[in-house]
Image (cartoon, rainbow, N blue to C red):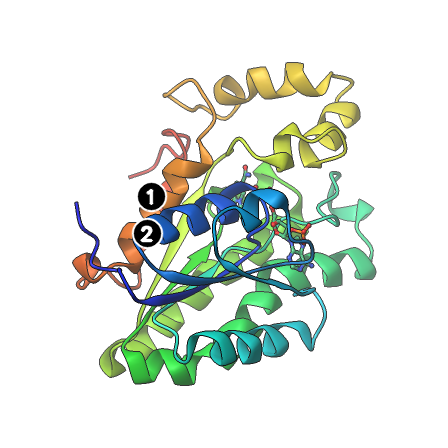
Amino acid sequence: MDLRLSGRTAVVTGASRGIGLATVAALRGEGMRVVAAARTVTPELEDLGAIAIPVDLGVAGGPARLVEAALAELGELDVLVNNVGGGDGAATGGFLSFDDEQWDEVYGLNLFATVRVTRAALPSLLRRGGAVVNVSSNGARIPHAGPVPYTTAKAALTAFGKALAEEFGPRGVRVNTVSPGPVRTAMWESPDGYGAQLAASLGLGREQLVAGLPATMGMTTGRLVEPTEVAALIAYLASPLAASTTGADHIIDGGSIKTA
Ligand SMILES: NC(=O)c1ccc[n+]([C@@H]2O[C@H](COP(=O)([O-])OP(=O)(O)OC[C@H]3O[C@@H](n4cnc5c(N)ncnc54)[C@H](OP(=O)(O)O)[C@@H]3O)[C@@H](O)[C@H]2O)c1
Protein backbone atom coordinates (compact mmCIF):
# COMPACT_ATOMS: atom_id res chain seq x y z
CA MET A 1 0.00 0.00 0.00
CA ASP A 2 1.32 3.44 -0.92
CA LEU A 3 0.88 5.66 2.16
CA ARG A 4 1.26 8.79 -0.01
CA LEU A 5 3.99 10.15 2.27
CA SER A 6 6.79 10.28 -0.28
CA GLY A 7 8.63 13.63 -0.34
CA ARG A 8 6.87 14.85 2.84
CA THR A 9 8.71 15.77 6.01
CA ALA A 10 8.65 14.41 9.57
CA VAL A 11 10.15 14.89 13.01
CA VAL A 12 10.44 11.80 15.21
CA THR A 13 11.49 12.12 18.86
CA GLY A 14 13.19 9.37 20.87
CA ALA A 15 14.58 8.06 17.60
CA SER A 16 17.90 6.38 18.43
CA ARG A 17 16.44 2.93 19.27
CA GLY A 18 13.22 1.01 19.92
CA ILE A 19 9.87 2.30 18.63
CA GLY A 20 11.36 5.64 17.53
CA LEU A 21 14.08 3.97 15.44
CA ALA A 22 11.51 1.62 13.85
CA THR A 23 9.31 4.64 13.07
CA VAL A 24 12.17 6.47 11.36
CA ALA A 25 12.80 3.30 9.30
CA ALA A 26 9.11 3.06 8.34
CA LEU A 27 8.85 6.75 7.34
CA ARG A 28 12.14 6.67 5.45
CA GLY A 29 10.85 3.53 3.70
CA GLU A 30 7.87 5.61 2.52
CA GLY A 31 10.27 8.18 1.04
CA MET A 32 9.92 10.85 3.73
CA ARG A 33 12.58 13.35 4.75
CA VAL A 34 12.99 12.77 8.49
CA VAL A 35 14.59 14.69 11.34
CA ALA A 36 15.31 12.23 14.14
CA ALA A 37 15.96 13.38 17.71
CA ALA A 38 17.59 11.70 20.72
CA ARG A 39 20.45 12.49 23.09
CA THR A 40 22.71 10.07 21.21
CA VAL A 41 23.02 9.29 17.52
CA THR A 42 23.34 5.52 17.19
CA PRO A 43 24.91 3.76 14.18
CA GLU A 44 21.49 2.16 13.49
CA LEU A 45 19.94 5.63 13.20
CA GLU A 46 22.78 6.92 11.04
CA ASP A 47 22.23 3.97 8.65
CA LEU A 48 18.63 5.09 7.96
CA GLY A 49 19.66 8.32 6.25
CA ALA A 50 17.62 10.55 8.54
CA ILE A 51 18.89 13.94 9.72
CA ALA A 52 19.87 13.15 13.31
CA ILE A 53 19.71 15.97 15.87
CA PRO A 54 21.31 15.23 19.25
CA VAL A 55 19.16 16.98 21.86
CA ASP A 56 17.96 16.45 25.44
CA LEU A 57 14.18 16.81 25.26
CA GLY A 58 13.81 16.47 29.02
CA VAL A 59 15.14 20.00 29.61
CA ALA A 60 13.05 23.10 28.94
CA GLY A 61 15.00 24.56 25.98
CA GLY A 62 15.56 21.23 24.15
CA PRO A 63 12.23 20.93 22.30
CA ALA A 64 12.37 24.48 20.85
CA ARG A 65 15.98 23.90 19.72
CA LEU A 66 14.92 20.68 17.99
CA VAL A 67 12.05 22.29 16.08
CA GLU A 68 14.23 25.24 15.08
CA ALA A 69 16.84 22.82 13.69
CA ALA A 70 14.15 20.73 11.97
CA LEU A 71 12.62 23.76 10.25
CA ALA A 72 16.09 24.83 9.09
CA GLU A 73 16.68 21.35 7.61
CA LEU A 74 13.21 20.55 6.24
CA GLY A 75 11.54 23.90 5.55
CA GLU A 76 8.09 22.85 6.81
CA LEU A 77 6.74 19.92 8.84
CA ASP A 78 4.05 17.52 7.59
CA VAL A 79 4.28 14.96 10.39
CA LEU A 80 5.30 15.06 14.06
CA VAL A 81 5.78 11.81 15.98
CA ASN A 82 6.11 12.50 19.71
CA ASN A 83 7.59 9.17 20.74
CA VAL A 84 10.09 10.18 23.42
CA GLY A 85 9.21 8.80 26.85
CA GLY A 86 9.91 6.09 29.38
CA GLY A 87 13.35 7.29 30.29
CA ASP A 88 16.06 6.79 32.83
CA GLY A 89 13.78 8.01 35.62
CA ALA A 90 11.17 5.29 35.04
CA ALA A 91 11.84 3.69 38.42
CA THR A 92 9.69 0.94 39.90
CA GLY A 93 7.91 1.12 43.26
CA GLY A 94 4.70 2.25 44.91
CA PHE A 95 3.34 5.80 45.18
CA LEU A 96 5.19 6.60 48.42
CA SER A 97 8.55 5.68 46.88
CA PHE A 98 8.57 8.61 44.41
CA ASP A 99 9.84 12.06 45.44
CA ASP A 100 9.24 15.40 43.67
CA GLU A 101 12.39 15.09 41.59
CA GLN A 102 11.26 11.75 40.13
CA TRP A 103 7.75 13.06 39.38
CA ASP A 104 9.29 16.10 37.65
CA GLU A 105 11.67 13.96 35.60
CA VAL A 106 9.02 11.46 34.47
CA TYR A 107 6.47 14.18 33.60
CA GLY A 108 9.23 16.22 31.92
CA LEU A 109 9.99 13.44 29.45
CA ASN A 110 6.58 11.75 29.08
CA LEU A 111 4.33 14.83 28.98
CA PHE A 112 6.14 18.19 28.82
CA ALA A 113 8.60 17.17 26.07
CA THR A 114 5.58 16.45 23.84
CA VAL A 115 3.77 19.63 24.93
CA ARG A 116 6.84 21.73 24.12
CA VAL A 117 7.78 20.06 20.80
CA THR A 118 4.16 20.27 19.65
CA ARG A 119 3.84 23.95 20.63
CA ALA A 120 6.95 24.80 18.62
CA ALA A 121 5.93 22.64 15.62
CA LEU A 122 2.25 23.62 15.32
CA PRO A 123 2.63 26.80 13.24
CA SER A 124 4.35 24.77 10.52
CA LEU A 125 1.95 21.80 10.86
CA LEU A 126 -0.96 24.24 10.47
CA ARG A 127 0.54 25.71 7.30
CA ARG A 128 0.94 22.19 5.88
CA GLY A 129 -2.29 20.55 7.15
CA GLY A 130 -0.11 18.09 9.01
CA ALA A 131 -0.53 15.14 11.36
CA VAL A 132 0.65 14.51 14.92
CA VAL A 133 1.03 11.05 16.46
CA ASN A 134 1.75 10.83 20.19
CA VAL A 135 3.09 7.62 21.72
CA SER A 136 1.37 7.02 25.04
CA SER A 137 0.88 3.63 26.77
CA ASN A 138 -1.93 1.22 27.55
CA GLY A 139 -0.86 1.98 31.15
CA ALA A 140 -2.83 5.24 30.75
CA ARG A 141 -5.97 3.05 30.94
CA ILE A 142 -4.67 0.70 33.67
CA PRO A 143 -2.68 3.13 35.81
CA HIS A 144 -2.10 0.67 38.68
CA ALA A 145 -0.16 -1.59 36.29
CA GLY A 146 3.00 0.54 36.21
CA PRO A 147 4.83 3.26 38.16
CA VAL A 148 2.20 5.88 38.97
CA PRO A 149 4.21 8.93 37.75
CA TYR A 150 4.64 7.18 34.38
CA THR A 151 1.09 5.90 33.91
CA THR A 152 -0.51 9.18 35.00
CA ALA A 153 1.82 11.21 32.76
CA LYS A 154 0.72 8.95 29.88
CA ALA A 155 -2.95 9.42 30.85
CA ALA A 156 -2.40 13.19 30.64
CA LEU A 157 -0.64 12.73 27.29
CA THR A 158 -3.60 10.77 25.90
CA ALA A 159 -5.98 13.52 27.08
CA PHE A 160 -3.64 16.16 25.60
CA GLY A 161 -3.90 14.45 22.19
CA LYS A 162 -7.70 14.44 22.35
CA ALA A 163 -7.82 18.14 23.27
CA LEU A 164 -5.41 19.10 20.49
CA ALA A 165 -7.37 17.09 17.92
CA GLU A 166 -10.53 18.98 18.84
CA GLU A 167 -8.90 22.42 18.76
CA PHE A 168 -6.85 22.01 15.59
CA GLY A 169 -8.99 19.55 13.56
CA PRO A 170 -11.08 22.36 12.04
CA ARG A 171 -7.82 23.99 10.92
CA GLY A 172 -6.60 20.86 9.12
CA VAL A 173 -4.26 19.19 11.64
CA ARG A 174 -5.04 15.63 12.76
CA VAL A 175 -3.83 14.33 16.15
CA ASN A 176 -3.84 10.66 17.16
CA THR A 177 -2.47 8.66 20.07
CA VAL A 178 -0.86 5.22 19.89
CA SER A 179 -0.92 3.27 23.16
CA PRO A 180 1.27 0.19 23.18
CA GLY A 181 1.42 -2.58 25.74
CA PRO A 182 4.82 -4.20 26.39
CA VAL A 183 7.02 -3.74 23.29
CA ARG A 184 10.29 -5.63 22.80
CA THR A 185 12.70 -2.68 23.30
CA ALA A 186 15.51 -1.65 25.66
CA MET A 187 12.84 -0.81 28.23
CA TRP A 188 12.47 -4.58 28.76
CA GLU A 189 15.65 -5.96 27.20
CA SER A 190 18.43 -3.77 28.56
CA PRO A 191 20.25 -5.12 31.65
CA ASP A 192 19.72 -1.74 33.37
CA GLY A 193 16.29 -0.86 31.92
CA TYR A 194 12.85 -0.72 33.53
CA GLY A 195 12.29 -4.48 33.06
CA ALA A 196 15.53 -5.32 34.86
CA GLN A 197 14.63 -2.98 37.74
CA LEU A 198 11.14 -4.46 37.99
CA ALA A 199 12.52 -8.01 37.91
CA ALA A 200 15.00 -7.21 40.70
CA SER A 201 12.23 -5.69 42.84
CA LEU A 202 10.22 -8.92 42.45
CA GLY A 203 13.22 -11.19 43.07
CA LEU A 204 13.16 -12.49 39.48
CA GLY A 205 15.70 -12.60 36.66
CA ARG A 206 15.01 -10.10 33.84
CA GLU A 207 14.61 -12.87 31.23
CA GLN A 208 12.23 -14.76 33.52
CA LEU A 209 10.11 -11.62 34.02
CA VAL A 210 9.98 -10.84 30.30
CA ALA A 211 9.09 -14.45 29.41
CA GLY A 212 6.14 -14.31 31.83
CA LEU A 213 4.99 -10.83 30.76
CA PRO A 214 2.46 -11.84 28.06
CA ALA A 215 0.64 -14.08 30.55
CA THR A 216 0.88 -11.54 33.40
CA MET A 217 -0.45 -8.77 31.16
CA GLY A 218 -3.15 -10.93 29.55
CA MET A 219 -1.68 -10.59 26.06
CA THR A 220 -3.73 -13.07 24.05
CA THR A 221 -1.08 -13.06 21.30
CA GLY A 222 1.31 -14.69 23.80
CA ARG A 223 4.27 -12.44 22.97
CA LEU A 224 5.55 -8.89 23.30
CA VAL A 225 4.65 -6.34 20.61
CA GLU A 226 7.40 -5.73 18.02
CA PRO A 227 8.64 -2.13 17.50
CA THR A 228 8.00 -2.51 13.75
CA GLU A 229 4.32 -3.25 14.47
CA VAL A 230 3.94 0.02 16.39
CA ALA A 231 5.85 1.88 13.67
CA ALA A 232 3.50 0.54 10.98
CA LEU A 233 0.48 1.89 12.90
CA ILE A 234 2.20 5.27 13.39
CA ALA A 235 3.03 5.48 9.67
CA TYR A 236 -0.60 4.75 8.73
CA LEU A 237 -1.90 7.43 11.13
CA ALA A 238 0.61 9.92 9.68
CA SER A 239 -0.63 9.17 6.18
CA PRO A 240 -3.32 11.03 4.20
CA LEU A 241 -5.01 7.61 3.93
CA ALA A 242 -6.04 8.18 7.58
CA ALA A 243 -7.66 11.54 6.75
CA SER A 244 -10.82 10.79 8.79
CA THR A 245 -8.96 9.33 11.77
CA THR A 246 -8.31 11.95 14.43
CA GLY A 247 -8.71 12.37 18.18
CA ALA A 248 -8.48 8.60 18.65
CA ASP A 249 -6.41 6.49 21.03
CA HIS A 250 -5.16 3.37 19.24
CA ILE A 251 -4.31 0.49 21.58
CA ILE A 252 -1.66 -1.95 20.31
CA ASP A 253 -1.11 -4.34 23.20
CA GLY A 254 -1.70 -7.92 22.08
CA GLY A 255 -5.17 -7.90 23.61
CA SER A 256 -4.06 -6.88 27.10
CA ILE A 257 -6.85 -4.34 27.73
CA LYS A 258 -10.05 -6.34 28.22
CA THR A 259 -12.69 -3.63 28.15
CA ALA A 260 -14.54 -2.70 24.91
N1 LIG B 1 8.60 -0.50 25.27
C1 LIG B 1 7.40 -0.59 25.82
O1 LIG B 1 7.03 -1.65 26.37
C2 LIG B 1 6.45 0.57 25.78
C3 LIG B 1 5.12 0.37 26.15
C4 LIG B 1 4.23 1.43 26.13
C5 LIG B 1 4.66 2.68 25.75
N2 LIG B 1 5.97 2.87 25.40
C6 LIG B 1 6.38 4.22 25.02
O2 LIG B 1 6.94 4.18 23.73
C7 LIG B 1 7.92 5.20 23.60
C8 LIG B 1 9.22 4.62 23.13
O3 LIG B 1 9.60 3.59 24.01
P1 LIG B 1 10.78 2.56 23.69
O4 LIG B 1 10.45 1.34 24.45
O5 LIG B 1 11.06 2.51 22.25
O6 LIG B 1 11.96 3.31 24.47
P2 LIG B 1 13.55 3.13 24.40
O7 LIG B 1 13.94 1.93 23.62
O8 LIG B 1 14.02 3.28 25.80
O9 LIG B 1 13.96 4.42 23.56
C9 LIG B 1 13.74 5.69 24.07
C10 LIG B 1 14.25 6.69 23.07
O10 LIG B 1 14.10 8.00 23.64
C11 LIG B 1 15.38 8.66 23.66
N3 LIG B 1 15.45 9.50 24.83
C12 LIG B 1 15.39 9.13 26.14
N4 LIG B 1 15.53 10.19 26.94
C13 LIG B 1 15.67 11.26 26.12
C14 LIG B 1 15.86 12.65 26.34
N5 LIG B 1 15.95 13.16 27.58
N6 LIG B 1 15.96 13.48 25.27
C15 LIG B 1 15.89 12.98 24.01
N7 LIG B 1 15.71 11.69 23.74
C16 LIG B 1 15.61 10.83 24.78
C17 LIG B 1 16.37 7.51 23.69
O11 LIG B 1 17.64 7.90 23.16
P3 LIG B 1 18.82 8.51 24.04
O12 LIG B 1 18.91 7.66 25.28
O13 LIG B 1 19.98 8.42 23.13
O14 LIG B 1 18.42 9.92 24.34
C18 LIG B 1 15.71 6.52 22.76
O15 LIG B 1 15.93 6.87 21.42
C19 LIG B 1 8.01 5.87 24.97
O16 LIG B 1 7.19 7.01 25.00
C20 LIG B 1 7.45 4.82 25.91
O17 LIG B 1 6.93 5.39 27.09
C21 LIG B 1 6.87 1.85 25.40
**What SS does tag 2 mark?**
helix
Q: Which residue is mark 2?
A: 235
Q: Position of residue 103 (x, y in %)?
A: 73, 58
Q: Which residue is mark 1?
A: 232
Labelled disc at residue 183? none
Q: Nearer the viewer, residue 85 or 78?
A: 78
Q: Kindly tell me whether residue 174 is visible in this rendering.
A: yes
Residue at position x 37%, y 68% from top?
Answer: 9
Q: Position of residue 206 (x, y in %)?
A: 70, 21
Quarter placement of the C terminus:
top left
Residue at position x 53%, y 21% from top?
Answer: 216
Residue 33: quadrant of the picture: bottom left
Q: Amino acid at mark 1?
A: Ala
Residue at position x 39%, y 56% from top?
Answer: 177
- In the rendered structure, the answer to whether residue 117 lies left or right of residue 221 reads right
Quarter placement of the N terminus:
top left
Q: Amino acid at mark 2?
A: Ala
Label 2 close to label 1 by CB (< 8 Å)? yes
Q: Nearer the viewer, residue 33 or 245?
A: 33
Residue 186: quadrant of the picture: top right
Q: Position of residue 66 (x, y in %)?
A: 59, 72
The vertical placement of 216 against 237, above or below, is above
CA gap, disc 2 to disc 1?
Answer: 5 Å
Q: Position of residue 111 (x, y in %)?
A: 58, 63
